[in-house]
Amino acid sequence: LFAKCSSRDELHVVRDAFYLGMASICCKEEYEVIREELITDEASASTIIASMNGPKALESMITSARSSAGWEPLLGALHELSSAVGSDLDQVWGGLERGRLEWLGALNAAHELKVILKTALDNRQHSQDDDTDAKMVWMYALSLSIPSLAQCRDAWSRTVQMQEPTNPLKSYNSELWDCRKAEWRPLDLGVQDAAERGGSSVNEAWDA
């Protein structure tokens, strides 16, 4: 579910579903209050049943759970338990959320260039090397939206003598864009790591 989220709101639905699941095991008393209300409250039950097996089923259940009088006590119990074992639920989830949103932002920002590159490949016979070259340009474009990659991104732009660091196709020279160069590896691994933090992979995103 995390890897399918495309917005902060969708991420928060998954987060709260995760909290409910944890509470069903670790905070059973608080969980039972909500479970009973979802079953006995006519409005909540009707909403959940109406959306059952549909794309909004989880969202409907979470919306009803959030409106329950037991929601805040459940969150309080979970956070108290988390603190007792030396963890921070908000920090843990916050890291996951930031990773997903950063990756989505990078994908959106580089989408237009990806379309241009793939269209160019589709319009002519191309080799595996052509695919690799196009993918490298796209990965560089992704890195423009990942602040932690600024240093290795700048190093690569100098390596390939890029005239405009925000426009990798301008003055593009395929002979300089060699993935065997040492300067490419940190950028390559950095983008792959960002994809993993976002619940995806570079190959999956390129093929989508």
Image (spheres, rainbow, N blue to C red):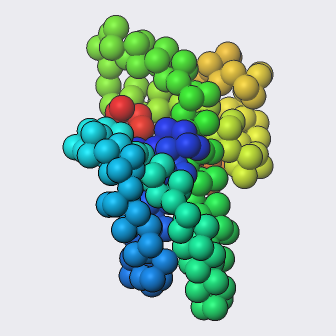
Residue 205 left/right relative to 142: left
x 41%, y 34%: residue:
206
If the image is split into quadrants, where does the C terminus sit?
A: top left
Residue occupying the far bottom of the picture = 84
Q: Position of residue 68 (x, y in %)?
A: 51, 60
Q: Is residue 95 above or below residue 185?
A: below
Q: Is residue 37 visible?
A: yes
Q: Position of residue 118 (x, y in %)?
A: 41, 19
x 45%, y 83%: residue:
29
Residue 70 left/right relative to 55: right
Q: Position of residue 66 (x, y in %)?
A: 53, 56
Between residue 78 and residue 117, name the one nearer to us: 78
Q: Is residue 137 visible?
A: no
Total numbered labels placed on residues in the image: 0
Residue occupying the far top of the picture = 123
x 55%, y 43%: residue:
9
Q: Is residue 43 above or below residue 70?
A: above
Q: Position of residue 114 (x, y in %)?
A: 49, 23
Between residue 128 and residue 72, name the one nearer to us: 72
Q: Is residue 164 above or below residue 189?
A: above
x 34%, y 60%: residue:
40
Q: Is residue 79 above or below residue 180?
A: below
Displayed quadrant of residue 84: bottom right
Between residue 194 and residue 6, name the one nearer to us: 6
